[in-house]
Each structure stands twice: as structure tokens, then as C-alpha cells.
Image (cartoon, grey):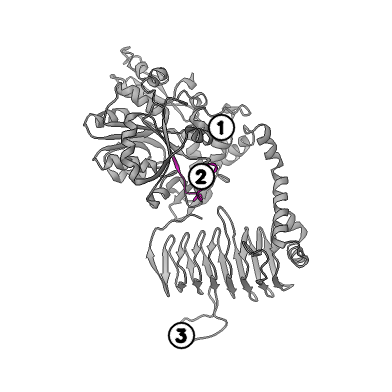
Amino acid sequence: MKEDCCGCNACGDICPKGAISFVTDEEGFWYPQIDKSKCVDCGLCEKVCPMLHVDDLRERNTTQPVCYEGQHKNIEVVFASTSGGMFTALADAAYRKKGYVGGAVHNEDFSVSQFISNDRQDLQRLRRSKDLQSNSEGFFREVRKAVQTGEQVLVCGVPCQMAALRSFLQKDYDNLVIVDLICLGVNSPKVWRKYLDYIEEEHGAKIVNTENKNKEYGWRNLTQKFLLANGEEIFDTCENSLFTKGFIGSRLYCRPSCYACKFKGFPRLADITIGDYWGKEKHSDKTDDNLGTSVILVNTNKGATYFEQVKKRIHCKEIPLEWIVQGNPALVKPIATNTNVNRNDFFCELERDAFPQVVEKYSKAGVLTGKARLKQLLRPVLQKMRFAKKVLRVTRCHPKALYQTVRYSGIKNLWQQRGILCGTHCVLEIHPKAQLNFKGLLTLGAKGRFPTSSLETRLLVASKGKLEILGDMIIGYGSDIEVFEGAQLIIHGNKHGVSDTNIGCTIICGKQIEIQADVGMGRNVLIRDNNGNHYMNTSGYRTARPVVIGEKAWLCESCTIMPGVKIGRGAIVGAESMVTSSVPAHALVFGSPAEVVEKNVLWKV
């Protein structure tokens, strides 16, 4: 039965005659196949199978885990990690001793394999979870070779793999520390490849890099980031990702053994267990940075000794095991089978039809029941109710604010939650011949912590001026937005994060200004694409030149963006800077005129 094989590959590594190979089935998972002509019936394959000996393996460890929450002290490590950077802290302790570190890495085709080395340069490949079945062929032999050198060895993987490693080695080496992950389940490599093919086809370029749980839109968004060969960056958050919908939402394509996993609960088979601290906000009085916090379960005395070596590199404190289990039910119970879909039909259609079409179809037949199902059915109604509440909060039921909101948006647009939502003390001058295109909601004059403030917010759209609202955006109170005759202001708004301005934003549009998605602005930011029809006798001078603020740019307090400037994606403009020339993506610029002071900077919305 397929549910009786976890695909750990240990049987193939132990076979002295090379009689065991692995055949991939129609779902993309591999299973052992024995060449009877080579087999000598030595029984080693059964001896190392963790599925057959899980109870014996558990008996080796009866210690109750000591539990911690932790986050690495180095913010760069946290950004580059799945949660709080615990794997990096643990790996560094081995590297400092010239030891070996093993774990899962992406191959050139973005399949996943287990890998071990003593080169710290490999850490970047090893960290971050991969969320699909990792091929371990040859890995157990490599670990045994590393352990026998006498150097420190740290190996990390999903629980079934780490149980297989213990079984394969048949003894507990003092210089080997085994770390397992809190695992929801491993997904089909075939489905993963179909997902990558879909992303490449959708955007017309090859993927050159990918990061699971990228932090630029926050840890909770479970963002899959793709870097394409054409330089484009794609962020697939949990709300949009078809792969996540099929995995976490509908549980369509985990390995069959995952639905009856034998490696849940306690005692753990690893020296240390790590994972995400889901539910931390229920137990912490500290402000949540949404960058991810790890949980650490120290399961053995050897694990405790090793963990003491890394404590100085992390912020950690002891917490009850119950808190971890509350947020991580996968620690103690397997993923639920989705009985609402025919798994065979899903994989057959996946071969025949387009990836998004198939996943959308089968994701609708989810595993929600009871209150969760009712909430899903009521979601459209709840969204309308939340929007109505927002209208009342922003307008404060002021007659003028309500009138302006209805007049310039229209009832049909407001029903679809788009248009212009006016706060109190808004002044709108929109010419009858102005062109308004609403595909999102522009909230004008948001008051934040000062709801009774009388500070004026102004919006001008002159004759033949164009205002395009393509997503939701909030304009803080005290702002002044002017779109002159024949000019065009394009606002993409909120795509994945939060797109808004603070108090006192000024946008003067005489030609074309485009503000792409998820742009954040501090207080008193000025963006202008023109010099007010003033002329200079300078070669090539123009009174107006288009401005583009790239996706997820951050414009800090009192900075000025001048005509002709293009701000690259994810760039940061420092406070009070004057930007007169274009800014590269992910650069930090500062000064007057602004200059690049740091490259490859990432920041969280």
C-alpha cells in the first residue's frame, strides 16, 4: 500500500547490491522497486525502514521536550529564513567547528534533494522550507561518511527522513545532532513543477530563483517569491497562490503516507524540533513584527547541550509545550484527508488540462466543515458589512462627506467597493470632462488617530485629466493631489501589502505619474512631474516628464521626487532626500541630491 511508504530512500542507500531503485508514479512520488536478480534477501531494507520500526525508535528517547520561542538577533538572517532563523543559528554552531550541515536544497530545475557539506556558502541553499518531497538517494551514506570523520554534524529534515536516518545508522553518534521540522505534509514534485510551468507561462520568462515564505509582505502571507530571467519579481501570497490553495486549503496533493503519518506526537525522534510559532500573538504582550518567530523543542540531553551553544545568537525564552501545540496541530496529528474530491481524477486532469483550471476546480471542494464552511458561505455578506462600517467610520456620517462619496463614485461602484471614499473636510474639484476610472477604492482624508481633525484634504482633476484607481489606496489627511488638464495619474493601490500615504502628501501631476502597487509614503512626501510651466535655457530641458514610483517602494518623510524620476521596485528613499535621477530596484538612497548608499536592501511592508 502506498500509504505504508514515506519515500525516505533509506532502503536504497542500505542495499549492498544496488538492487533497489525508485520509480515515480502518476502523482510524482517515488516508490522502491526491487530487482530480484540482484537481491540476496539480506533483509537490510526492512531493517532500516522507519515505517516498520517507529515504535522501537521512539523507545530510545523518553525525555520530555523543553520548549522555547526564538528569533535570530541578526535581522538579515530573519529576512532570509522561513520563520525566526533557528536553522541558521543551529547550522552556524556546526560550521564554527568546521563541521557538516545537511538539509534540503533546490536543484537547478527546482526539484528538491537532500544535501550535506562543510562549506558555509551552502547555507543560503539549505535554509527555508521547500514544502515538497525531497529526494534522499545517497544522502544517508553521505551523512554516515561525514559522521565517521569525527567532526560535528548537524542534519535537518522532515520527521520521517530523520527517523530513517536514525534507523539507517543503527547507533547514536555523539557528534551527530538530528533536527526535524514540524511538518504538515510533503507535496507532489509533479504538482510543484506544474505550478512553476504555470508561473513561467503566465509571465513569459524562465524562473531563475524562488524563495518560500519570503518576508517582504510579512511572515503570515506565506509568500512564494519568484525571480524571473527578465528581472521581474513575482510574489504569490497565500491569498493568491494556487499551490497554497491546493496544499493548505484543500490538501489535494500530499504524499499518501502523510495522511496517516506515524511520526507525530511524542517522544520525538530528533534531538531538536523546530517550526513556526503560530499563535504567538495570543501569548505575547510584545508588538508583533510579522517577520516570524521560531519554536524550538529540545528533545534530548544531547540536543540541550548543543542548543546552549546557539542561545547567545538568538532572542529566546522558555514557553509551555501547550502553546506550541495550539498553533501547530501538525505536531501531534496528521493532515486530514480531503474526502470531497477524487484524487485519481485530480491527477488525471492535471496531466490533461491547465494547472490553474484544475486546482481552482478541486480547491472549491475543500475540507471545510461546520463553522468554517458557514463562514466561507457568508464571506461576501461579511465583506459588504465591513465595507459599510468603513464608510461610516471614514465619513463619520457627515452629510457633505457622504454626498461627495456618492456623487463621485456612484452607487454601482460603491456596491462593488470601489470609487472615492471621502472623509470629513475634503475639497474635491473634479471637472465634468475629467475621466475617472475606478477598479479600486481611493480613501481620501483618512484621519488615523485624529478623527475630529479639521485639516483639509484636496483633490483636483481638471478638464480632460485622467484619474485611474486600479486598487485600494488610502490618502492621509492634509494631502493635496492635483491632476492638471490632459494629465494622467495612475494609482495601482494595494496588491499584497498596505498602500497608503501619511499626513501631508502632495502629488502634482502635469503629464503622467504612476504609483504602482504597495507603495508606502511617510509624512509630507512630495511627488511632481512638472516645473509649473517655468522654462530654463538648459539643453534638453522640459517642463514636465513622467514619474513612476515602482511597486513596493518606500518614500520616507519629507522626501521629494522630481520630474522624470523612476523609483525601482522595493527601493527606499531616505527622509528629506531630493531625488532628481532614477533609483535602482532594492536600493537605499539618501541626500540632496539623493545618492545610492546601499544596494540589495529588502524591507517588510
Q: Residue at x 66, y 31 (%)?
A: 369
**Residue 402 left/right relative to 270:** right
**Label 1 to label 2: alpha-carbon separation:** 34 Å
Instruction: Name the residue carrying label 3.
Output: 538
Kindly indicate the quadrant of the structure image that contains residue 375.
top right
Q: Residues within 10 Å of mark 3 (few under 14, many from 20)?
A: few
Mark 2: which secondary structure?
loop
Question: Could you say where residue 137 lies in the image, as x and y percent from the top left?
Answer: 35, 29
The boundaries of the magenta stretch are 281-294
Asked if the magenta segment contains residue 284, the reply would be yes
Question: Could you say where residue 32 lies in the image, as x and y percent from the top left?
Answer: 40, 22
Asked if the magenta segment contains residue 314, the reply would be no
**Label 3 to label 1: alpha-carbon separation:** 64 Å
Instruction: Name the residue carrying label 2.
Output: 284
Kindly indicate the quadrant of the structure image that contains residue 498.
bottom right
**Relative to 327, does residue 414 appear above or below in the rendering?**
below
